[in-house]
Image (cartoon, rainbow, N blue to C red):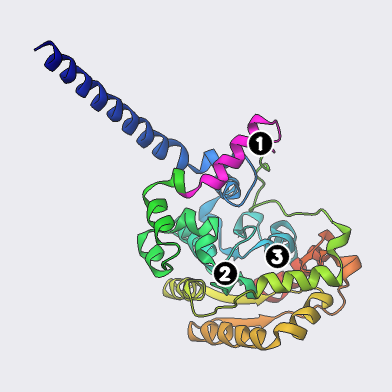
Amino acid sequence: MHSFIFNFKSYWRHKLGLLILLILFTTLELTVFRNLNFYGQSSGFIGQLDTLQESFSHAKKQNITYAVFGDSQSLDALRPDLMAAEANLEKDSLFNFSITGGKAYDIYHTYLTYRNQMPALKKVIIVVNEHQLNSSAIDEDIKFRYYAGLKDRFKVMNKNNYGELLIGWGSKAFDMRTIWSKMLDQFITGKLKAPPKWQPGGLQAETYTIPQNKSISYAKSTADRWFKDFDLNGLQADSFQRLLADLKSRGVEITVLKIPRSEEFETAVKEKYGEQQREFDQQVKALTDLYGGTYYIMSNAGLTLQDDFRDTNHVNPKGASIISRNVARLWLRP
């Protein structure tokens, strides 16, 4: 009898311990690992989404009539203050949603996050480049992991990643472990960098220059990275099309731009990936035409790597001033 009572108590202590662990895990999932503000304690691909959210929270949303979507190229090149001044627009009427490392899937889901909060939106500029529509290794992209639901995860599953994607869907702690474990390690060692402060109109552009990134070798390595296992038939291209379709359904005017990169970078691409680049331009134009937009490839004439770029495919503040004003003058003036 005594043994029975002991086993009974032990059984319920075990059950109670599991219940406490389950409650703790669920609490952490909901309050920490699915919380943008947690990742926003540090800079990074996911942390920047928190900073963007903070910037948007201070915007006069009902006044936003022009928006920019893209990646770090358009983040650096299209400055809301310069564009508004050149086009004689109110500063509150323009917002740049560009994110570092942005691909078509992330850009589309960033748009979905804010679409219903911009009732006056009438024109969108989407800045594209070849890496954005390359669906190769999309399952390894941490931004995809953050945004993707089960339906999109099924689209990219294979025999090598189905376990990661399924468990990650159920647990953001697992899905985002490379991010929060790095943050924890940096916090313990005192190397955790403070996140960038929010600023009006979107994220803060990068202005630093690394001399070795202004070279032919860097241009070639970037081109290799962009075109690795180039795949224009996957979820990235599909996301670009869904973005265009949604904008058209709302009656929003669409301009799709490929903004200037250095001549050194363009040469590196054409020498090794000319066919893939032509395929990209043809597909982007076809999709843009299908949804009533215009696709324009901007010239880099007059821009030099040494004077106007911080690396071979990102402009510095001088280049940003030139491109921002050109884009505003050509596509944003009422």
- Identify residue type, mark 1: Gln
Mark sitting on residue 16: none
| Badge 1: residue crowd in 10 Å (few <14, some 14–19, many ≥20) | some
Residue 79, above or below 184: below
State which mark lies toward you, 3 or 2: 3
**Mark before the other along the chain sequence, 3 or 2:** 3
Q: Are marks 3 and 2 in contact (CB under 8 Å)?
A: no
Q: x and y percent of residue 22 in the render?
A: 32, 33
Q: Residue furthest top?
A: 2
State which mark lies toward you, 3 or 1: 1
How far apart in space, not on screen, are marks 1 and 2 (Cα)? 38 Å
Quick check: 7 left or right of 234? left
Q: Which residue is mark 3?
A: 73
**Mark before the other along the chain sequence, 1 or 2:** 2
Q: x and y percent of residue 41 in the render?
A: 60, 38
Q: x and y percent of residue 196 in the render?
A: 68, 43
Instruction: Kindly state the secondary structure of the residue where label 2 is placed.
Output: strand
Q: Which residue is mark 2?
A: 124
Q: Which residue is mark 1?
A: 186
| Badge 3: residue crowd in 10 Å (few <14, some 14–19, many ≥20) | many
- Identify residue type, mark 2: Val
Examine the image and state in which quarter residue 173 appears: top left
How far apart in space, not on screen, are marks 3 and 2 (Cα)? 16 Å
Q: Residue furthest left?
A: 1
Main secondary structure along the magenta-highlighted residues: helix
Examine the image and state in which quarter residue 28 appears: top left
Q: Residue at left 55%, top 78%?
A: 231
Quarter of the picture containing the C terminus is bottom right
How far apart in space, not on screen, are marks 3 and 1 (Cα)? 28 Å
Q: Residue at left 88%, top 59%?
A: 211
Instruction: Write the start and end of the magenta stretch as one range.
Output: 175-193
